[in-house]
Image: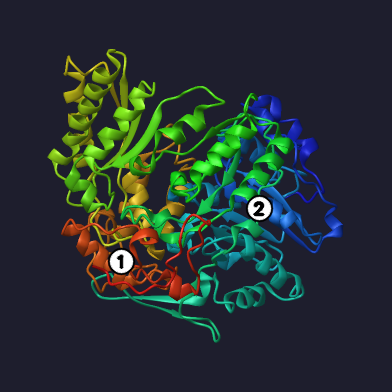
């Protein structure tokens, strides 16, 4: 356990250690646009954490937004902290220096709230490491009134049950309004005990406090029920849904990092949510409905952000940015505004059916023409029907042909392996598609230097999706299919040099699957892995599959459970799932019917254009789809599933 030393700033002691560690600049703070407030002048103090290295966490859009939202209020202070690499963490333990904030190097134990963004399950051990290094008891039951409340948010918090022992509360959904509401409750209850504060938060019905819910189990080890154990606590916890993104134009002045980070650009979220209905995509399901930002606000945000940062790249972010109803006007307007400057525009990977050459030309007008990236996800037509990726192969080839005709020479494609009902043939179809793309490119350009890069990841079933009941494909099968595909392409003299294929070890995906659909019985597994040295599990050089399996087998076998029970076991329709008491607006029966449609290879169209499919979000959360003037909102229109 780290030794806590109370001090207004730990930096003088920390500075003495920095010459002895790698990349010391990442710990210095003092970045452009960071905010330092007088500690005594505020009433509520947050420390926001992304549980990964500074290079990853500083690029996180969610943390950047909440940092500004909180600091704009005169009575609230927000600082940041990140995971500390083992070299410095070891020295800090030796010297009794606890986990600190980046702005003022204060111990994070001094703050009122430690707000943690959980975006990936493989970050759980980093959370435990930070708590221990801070001198905060890792189990919530052991914390005292003077310890900060540990509140998590982010996509992984939509099933926080595996870390229920370690957190005080979880916020589901959008964070902008949530952090202000939580702050106001804490502001008016500063003299209350820890338990009293948590009770006030839980009674809102929008903050989940695991300690206030009891879980019982059936003889077959499945969950029997999750029930509140305090009066006034709701049976279901609802998510926060932010409407009118134009009223929340953040980040306005994002922090410019002092050390290299994974993304160095100004990013503006052009819309939130997605209604494409990809059955594997948790983000698309849990962020419904679609809410677009207007062209004027996007333009103003870009202008302000570039002036505040000096960046020369603008990322137009969303789950499917080319689906914004006015994406052509947005890209043309920005390209016109920054014509002749060094400012370039970028989109995340694009759906083939939302792509057009005009869009690609506008994105590359002020920057270099890079390769185009698409995400078919499934190699065969059948597989794309199963996952509801409504992309026809002929349309895909037509799009690629247009791109090659317009001067592009490189195409990158993202796929997944191990999807439900997948066969060896479905994976081999990835190679056939890549060969067809190369043929088209060579035919159109008359050149041999066209290229196609294939990137494949292992599929992990996630909560709140139509595949939440699916069995996860066994690791060995996934790896064998990817190896076979790669070998077949390498051995192909006609295409082997034109097609490159990359895939990652699928074993981390098995652990991710274990944690993604896990329950409270996995808490001791996470703790054992951390005690055995497990940190930075999202980094291949630190991840140990054997460490996870050893801990899981030791802990779970005593309860009559196994890793396979959580991963490769298909759930039945009426089994109580660990996250069933989280109300994200999605109708459970609709998800089940969509799972059955998947097995029958039936696709469902985007409800923005084809009518409501009764997923439950709009009427359940009393919200609506919000689109620009060229789009149309179908809102709560009642259209049958068929």
Mark closer to the chain start, 2 or 1? 2
Secondary structure found at label 1 = helix
Residue 232 in the image: above or below residue 615: below
Q: Which disc, if any, is residue 249?
A: 2
Direction from residue 488 to residue 26 in the image, left or right? right
Q: In the picture shown, does residue 112 fall above or below 14?
A: below
Residue at left offset 24%, top offset 65% = 571
Identify the residue at the far front of this view: 630
Distance between mark 2 and mark 1 Cα atoms: 33 Å
Number of marks in picture: 2
Can residue 473 be seen here?
no
Establish if 393 lies above or below 497.
below
* Rendering quarter of residue 216: bottom left
Task: Name the residue tied to disc 1.
Answer: 591
- Please give left or right for residue 94 compared with residue 129 in the image: right
Say which of 293 and 362 sits in front.
Answer: 362
């Amino acid at each position: 356990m780290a030794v806590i030393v109370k001090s207004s700033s730990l930096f003088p002691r920390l500075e003495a250690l920095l010459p002895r560690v790698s990349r010391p600049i990442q710990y210095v703070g003092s970045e452009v646009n960071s905010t330092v407030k007088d500690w005594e002048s505020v009433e509520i103090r947050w420390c926001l954490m992304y549980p990964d290295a500074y290079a990853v966490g500083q690029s996180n859009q969610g943390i950047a937004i909440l940092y500004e939202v909180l600091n704009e209020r005169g009575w609230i202070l927000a600082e940041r902290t990140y995971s500390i690499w083992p070299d410095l963490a070891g020295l800090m333990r030796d010297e009794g220096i606890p986990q600190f904030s980046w702005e003022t190097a204060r111990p994070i134990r001094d703050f009122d709230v430690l707000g943690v963004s959980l975006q990936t399950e493989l970050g759980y051990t980093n959370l435990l490491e930070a708590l221990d290094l801070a001198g905060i008891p890792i189990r919530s039951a052991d914390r005292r009134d003077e310890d900060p409340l540990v509140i998590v948010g982010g996509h992984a918090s939509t099933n926080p049950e595996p870390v229920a022992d370690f957190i005080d509360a979880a916020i589901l959904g959008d964070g902008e309004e949530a952090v202000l509401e939580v702050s106001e409750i804490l502001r008016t209850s500063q003299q209350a005990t820890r338990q009293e504060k948590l009770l006030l938060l839980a009674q809102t019905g929008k903050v989940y406090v695991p300690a206030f819910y009891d879980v019982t189990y059936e003889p077959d080890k499945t969950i029997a029920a999750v029930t509140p154990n305090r009066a006034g606590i709701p049976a279901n916890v609802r998510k926060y849904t932010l409407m009118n993104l134009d009223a929340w134009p953040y980040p306005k002045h994002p922090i410019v990092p002092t050390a290299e980070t994974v993304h160095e650009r100004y990013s503006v979220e052009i819309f939130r949510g997605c209604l494409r209905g990809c059955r594997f995509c948790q983000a698309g399901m849990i962020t419904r409905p679609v809410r677009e930002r207007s062209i004027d606000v996007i333009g103003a945000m870009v202008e302000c952000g570039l002036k505040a940062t000096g960046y020369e790249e603008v990322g137009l972010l969303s789950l499917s940015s080319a689906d914004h109803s006015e994406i052509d006007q947005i890209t043309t307007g920005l390209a016109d505004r920054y014509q002749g400057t060094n400012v370039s525009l970028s989109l995340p990977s694009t759906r083939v059916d939302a792509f057009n050459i005009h869009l690609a030309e506008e994105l590359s007008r002020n920057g270099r023409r890079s390769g185009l990236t698409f995400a078919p996800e499934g190699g065969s037509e059948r597989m794309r029907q199963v996952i509801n990726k409504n992309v026809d192969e002929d349309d895909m080839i037509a799009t690629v042909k247009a791109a090659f005709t317009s001067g592009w020479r490189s195409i990158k494609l993202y796929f997944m392996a191990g999807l439900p009902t997948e066969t060896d043939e479905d994976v081999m179809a990835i190679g056939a598609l890549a060969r067809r793309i190369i043929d088209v490119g060579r035919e159109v350009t008359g050149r041999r230097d066209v290229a196609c890069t294939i990137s494949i990841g292992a599929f992990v079933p996630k909560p709140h999706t139509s595949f939440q009941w699916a069995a996860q494909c066994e690791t060995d099968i996934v790896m064998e299919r990817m190896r076979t595909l790669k070998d077949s392409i390498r051995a192909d003299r006609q295409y082997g040099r034109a097609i490159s294929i990359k895939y990652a070890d699928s074993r981390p995906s098995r652990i991710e699957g274990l944690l993604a659909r896990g329950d409270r019985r996995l808490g001791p597994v996470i703790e054992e892995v951390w005690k055995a040295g497990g940190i930075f599990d999202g980094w291949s050089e630190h991840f140990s599959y054997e460490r996870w399996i050893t801990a899981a087998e030791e802990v779970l076998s005593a309860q009559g459970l196994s890793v396979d029970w959580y991963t490769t076991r298909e759930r039945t329709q009426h089994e109580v799932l660990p996250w069933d008491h989280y109300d994200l607006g999605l109708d459970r029966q609709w998800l089940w019917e969509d799972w059955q449609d998947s097995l029958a290879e039936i696709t469902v169209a985007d409800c923005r254009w084809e009518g409501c499919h009764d997923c439950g979000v709009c009427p359940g959360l009393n919200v609506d789809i919000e689109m620009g003037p060229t789009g149309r909102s179908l809102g709560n229109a009642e259209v049958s599933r068929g």
